[in-house]
């Protein structure tokens, strides 16, 4: 799609289906003229209402009609260039809900000269008209699709410009150094040193470590967007399905005292303190001759490999020998960074004073609440939605790639410095770093990048 800012676009901005109201949005130079053609304050059709005389941010009651046939009673809101979402003249018509009416009004608007807006085209115009930078425009899409407090919190932060201000801060630092280095080049013959090479090095190293920290937040960001894959694993009868059901507050999985009840894995979504979890109950692990059970156990292992977090359950009422063996298995076979040892059924045998790990009983709700807290802590997602965590989390792969490119360019600056090369080479590396930073906010961009981003938006936004 080419960017053509000279035409006027229109779309229904509310979702399809029946509802109280629907909003049809028009943006562009001819918005007022087109709306004036179909809107009147009286029932008698065209009364010469001049929308261009309305103040910005005012709402007007009236009628939309086509050749004296009234289509609907509406409220019309006026936003004047540049004080609108897109930065252009914008009209929003709130009609009665229902696709039929909204479509009829939209068709009329198109007939009067507007063009159907493509996905995200209003936001794309907002970006092209300088109302927001690219990372903020991307946050709009994330905000609309967020389903949990955690993803809402991270996208609203990005929309407010947290990533943009970080990028701009780093950019300013690099520009400072680069301009001094380039000034030095102008005075090359006089052998002046405007900036100490040691200082360039320290600065570059500092920026690299700051950016690397943000790059590493991507994993967390991905989890926020897609959910934490939480696998409940352990030997048969350890209480996996019971915990799964308890967390979900349903009887989703079959529970019994027969070892080997669960054969296949079961997956359900769950939100804990604003964080989305994909909860997976698995078949109990043991050596089995049974073909179906063996296949189930194989699947348990593959789920554990894909997991972001594993709860390894052991029945506290087992014999000491088995408990010991199981604890050993956990320590040896599991990635400690993403696994928690959980002793279940503490009501039958309380091991709290004897074994490290988490002790739970489904008969004691407080033990499950404590388990939830420990789970969030393990994946460092506690305090995420309370506003206590001030860190920037990137959730977008494009941003990660751009930041990695910035770091690469800065690393090659360091290599150039170590090789004792001149300012000319340094400034080439630094300029590359600047270009990659500019890609995040959209200062440096091209049609392909933009189309890729806005293609994922919904129509009407
Ligand atoms: N007393 C007590 N019993 C529990 C608790 N949690 C689970 N159980 C019992 O332990 C038995 C096994 O529970 P399941 O949830 O089926 O165990 P599982 O790990 O899914 O077993 P498999 O599917 O066979 O691998 C059932 O009889 C449960 O009622 C608990 O906290 N306290
Ligand atoms: Mg089970």
Image: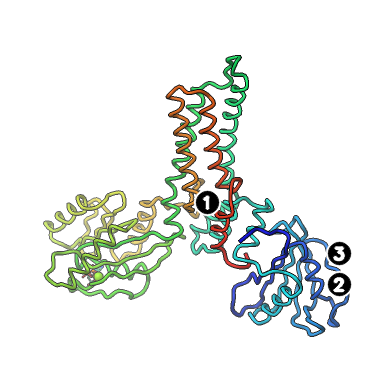
Residue at image x 73%, y 60%? 6
Q: Is residue 148 left or right of residue 63?
A: left
Residue 25 appears in the picture as rendered: yes
Question: Could you give the CA–CA distance between mark 1 and mark 3, rounded to whole angstroms?
Answer: 44 Å
Q: Nearer the viewer, residue 16 or 415?
A: 415
Residue 235 image offset from top left, x and y in percent: 19, 63
Residue 387: which disc?
1
Residue 209 image offset from top left, x and y in percent: 45, 36
Residue 379 image offset from top left, x and y in percent: 38, 52
- List the residue tagged with mark 2: 49
Residue 346 appears in the picture as rendered: no
| Number of the front mark, 1 or 3 | 3
Q: Nearer the viewer, residue 59 or 78?
A: 78
Residue 441 image offset from top left, x and y in percent: 58, 47
Q: Is residue 108 left or right of residue 343?
A: right
Q: Quadrant of ligand 2?
A: bottom left
């Amino acid at each position: 799609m080419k960017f053509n800012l000279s035409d006027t676009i229109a779309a229904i901005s509310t979702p399809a289906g029946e509802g109280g109201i629907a909003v049809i949005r028009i943006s562009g130079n001819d918005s007022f003229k087109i709306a004036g053609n179909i809107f009147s304050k009286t029932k008698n059709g065209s009364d010469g209402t001049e929308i261009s005389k309305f103040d910005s941010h005012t709402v007007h009651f009236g009628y939309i009609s086509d050749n004296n046939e009234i289509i609907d009673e509406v409220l019309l809101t006026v936003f004047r260039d540049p004080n609108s979402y897109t930065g252009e003249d914008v009209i929003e018509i709130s009609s009665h809900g229902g696709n039929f009416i909204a479509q009829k009004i939209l068709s009329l608007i198109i007939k009067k000269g507007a063009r159907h807006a493509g996905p995200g085209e209003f936001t794309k115009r907002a970006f092209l008209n300088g109302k927001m930078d690219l990372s903020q425009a991307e946050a709009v899409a994330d905000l609309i699709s967020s389903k949990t407090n955690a993803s809402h919190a991270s996208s609203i932060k990005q929309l407010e410009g947290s990533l943009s201000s970080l990028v701009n801060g780093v950019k300013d630092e690099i520009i400072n150094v680069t301009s001094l280095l380039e000034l030095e080049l102008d005075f090359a013959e006089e052998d002046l040193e405007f900036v100490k090479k040691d200082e360039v090095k320290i600065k570059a190293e500092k920026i690299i470590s700051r950016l690397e920290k943000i790059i590493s937040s991507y994993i967390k960001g991905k989890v926020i967007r897609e959910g934490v894959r939480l696998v409940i694993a352990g030997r048969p009868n350890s209480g996996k399905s019971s915990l799964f059901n308890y967390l979900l507050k349903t009887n989703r999985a079959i529970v019994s005292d027969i070892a080997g009840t669960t054969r296949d894995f079961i997956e359900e979504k769950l939100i804990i303190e604003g964080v989305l979890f994909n909860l997976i109950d698995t078949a109990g692990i043991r050596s089995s001759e049974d073909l179906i059970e063996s296949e189930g156990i194989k699947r348990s292992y593959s789920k554990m490999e894909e997991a972001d977090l594993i709860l390894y359950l052991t029945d506290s009422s087992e014999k000491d020998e088995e408990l010991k063996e199981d604890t050993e298995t956990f320590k040896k076979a599991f990635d400690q960074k993403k696994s928690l040892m959980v002793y279940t059924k503490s009501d039958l045998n309380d091991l709290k004073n004897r074994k490290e790990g988490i002790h739970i009983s489904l008969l004691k709700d407080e033990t499950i609440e404590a388990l939830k807290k420990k789970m969030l802590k393990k994946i460092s997602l506690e305090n995420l939605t309370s506003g206590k965590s001030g860190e920037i989390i990137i959730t977008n792969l494009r941003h990660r790639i751009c930041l990695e490119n910035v770091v690469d360019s800065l690393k090659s600056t360091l290599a150039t410095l170590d090789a004792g090369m001149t300012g000319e080479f340094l400034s080439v590396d630094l300029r590359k770093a600047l270009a990659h930073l500019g890609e995040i906010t959209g200062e440096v961009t091209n049609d392909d990048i933009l189309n890729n981003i806005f293609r994922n938006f919904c129509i009407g936004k």
